[in-house]
Amino acid sequence: MEREDIMRGKIIASKSEEKKENPLHRQLKQFKNKDVQIMQKNNETKDGKILAIDNYLNIAVETSEGIEFIKGTRLLYIQLLS
């Protein structure tokens, strides 16, 4: 950064300071908007349609009981239903 830029109040962010997006992993994309069965670690199962999923496996699923949110740390597996 040049001295003139600093004196004028301009701040130029380096690449390491820029906010980097963390895109959804390609294998998780297959579950979005699909009918699934979710098995949780407490042996509860949820059948429904995944509305949203992130890289931590946090899930918003639409079930017969309404929209439910499940933390990724509580998941045992996700099964695609045909």
Image: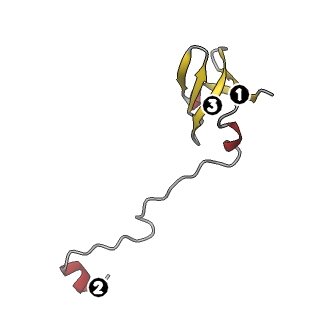
**CA gap, disc 1 and disc 2:** 56 Å
Q: Amino acid at mark 3?
A: Ile
Residue 44 location (% of width, % of height)? 65, 14
Mark nearer the N terminus (1 vs 2) = 2
Considering the image in quadrants, where does the N terminus appear?
bottom left
- Disc number placed over residue 35 in the picture, else none: 1
Query: Which label sits in the foreground, 1 or 2?
Result: 1
Considering the image in quadrants, where does the C terminus appear?
top right
Residue 25 location (% of width, % of height)? 64, 48
Q: Which residue is mark 2?
A: 2
Decide if residue 18 is on the left or right side of residue 12.
Answer: right
Name which quarter of the figure residue 30 lies in: top right
Q: Which residue is mark 3?
A: 50
**The residue tagged with tag 2: helix, strand or loop?**
loop
Q: Amino acid at mark 2?
A: Glu
- Tell me what residue is drawn at x 71 percent, y 45 percent: 27
